[in-house]
Amino acid sequence: MKATLAPSSLISLPRHKVSSLRSPSLLLQSQRPSSALMTTTTAASRGSVAVTAAATSSVEALREGIAEFYNETSGLWEEIWGDHMHHGFYDPDSSVQLSDSGHREAQIRMIEESLRFAGVTEEEKKIKRVVDVGCGIGGSSRYIASKFGAECIGITLSPVQAKRANDLATAQSLSHKVSFQVADALEQPFEDGIFDLVWSMESGEHMPDKAKFVKELVRVAAPGGRIIIVTWCHRNLSQGEEALQPWEQNLLDRICKTFYLPAWCSTSDYVDLLQSLSLQDIKCADWSENVAPFWPAVIRTALTWKGLVSLLRSGMKSIKGALTMPLMIEGYKKGVIKFGIITCQKPL
Amino acid sequence: MRLIVHNMLTCNIKGVINKFPLRIEAEKVIKKEVDFNPDFLRHMLAKIEWKALVDGARSMGYTELPDHAPALESDEPFLRKFHHALLELNLEEGSLVCQESGRKFPVEKRVPNMLLHEDEV
């Protein structure tokens, strides 16, 4: 059976002036009572003068929470799913239940589809230096470095992940090509314009300030370089819609708490940000249908004997994370959660 | 952390102008052999900030690099030294120090921690 690749919708956007960012959730320190950082109401949402101070230490708390979450859960994930900590890419109508290796292949396919969508695969020779923003244990970095023979630097908030990523690189004889640091995607410790490819695979959802996150991606991209963002978003808001429905927000809030996510934004919000920074060739797509088999598969592996034992050993954060997975499925099914890809090129 | 990475790392503390290079305070350095690839090295030569590499190598105990990269880059003895400094010296434990602010970024188990504190952003 010939596989047909059909990302649900492919939108190539004409450039147009962006007058304002629609979603208040883009900035943690928004003046409007925005969706809360976690489920609790903070000073920020009461609009007090102490917004900035309260919001700033919330950012620190989030950063620490993310680091601890991945310090605790990375080993467990790797044991069961391997070194790619992202969704697999599947044909939309596929009803075949895949084996473990089938899902691993789907995760590789996600990388390849993303590169192809961004137009990178035709320009392989130009890719010499890559940054992997939110690199996990370095699966994408090692894959891309091997594929392009490029130098790849990964950054993560988790010291456990960075060390593991380096160890895996050494084991795969890639340590001269790839290396990993603990650093903040919102304050990348690099000079401007040095990366031919800026890669963010499922890390954008952790960024409390989407505008700053995107600005940093753009800053470190080389002139002519490509930026690829693959991330969890909420659905685009309709004309005149100010925010998600309360039930939708409630669903996301419950997910935010256990996965250490700040407020969500939409794919359109990312597009708006990139347009406001004058990026070229901005493209986006909704790949929600292409990732549908993923969470059910993760739940199935969690419910195996090995999965359950490993979860219990791993700790409360892992267990809570596992219990939240059905909410992801619910979010996708109800059209609240979207799996988005947004790519662009920095002008020369 | 190898010098190929050190050659890219900057201190992004707000207000700091002299962000690069970071001075290395080495506590533990290990040497790990890496395959010699002249093409890769020649390509990297164009991108490397030479003085930062020389100073970094000295901080890690390697003093064989010339003060300036030679004009004839195909000279193999030179490439071997370049290769060793760039790829084979590994800072296992130590600090990267911002020359302007004095801030130390720790390197633990070969991983630099470049996270900034709240008041540095």
Image (tube, coloured by chain):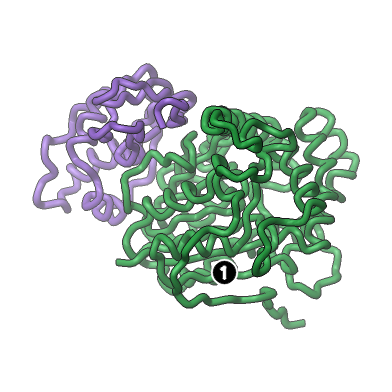
Chain colours: A green, B purple
As drawn, A180 above or below A5: above
Camera sees residue A105: no
Camera sees residue A77: yes
> Chain under label 1?
A
Dividing the picture into quadrants, the one containing residue A99 is: bottom right
**Dot 1: element:** strand
Amino acid carrying label 1: it is Cys
User: Where is residue B110 drawn, in percent x and y?
Assistant: 45, 29
Q: Is residue A223 left or right of residue A2?
A: left
User: Where is residue B1 drawn, in percent x and y?
Assistant: 40, 32
Residue sitting nearer the eye, A329 or A122: A329
Q: Residue at x 50, y 47 (%)?
A: A133
As drawn, B28 above or below A51: above
Dividing the picture into quadrants, the one containing residue A339 is: bottom right
Quadrant in which the C terminus of chain A appears: bottom left
Q: Is residue A92 left or right of residue A58?
A: right
Q: Which residue is mark 1?
A: A284
Quadrant in which the N terminus of chain A appears: bottom right
Q: Residue at x 72, y 68 (%)?
A: A290
Q: Residue furthest left?
A: B71
Q: Residue at x 56, y 44 (%)?
A: A30
Residue sitting nearer the eye, A30 or A100: A30
User: Where is residue B61 drawn, in percent x and y?
Assistant: 26, 23
The residue carrying pointer 1 sits among few (fewer than 14), some (14 to 19) or many (20 or more) residues within 10 Å by Cα, namely many
Dividing the picture into quadrants, the one containing residue A135 is: top right
Q: Is residue A13 left or right of residue B104?
A: right
Residue sitting nearer the eye, A249 or B66: A249
As drawn, B121 above or below A108: above
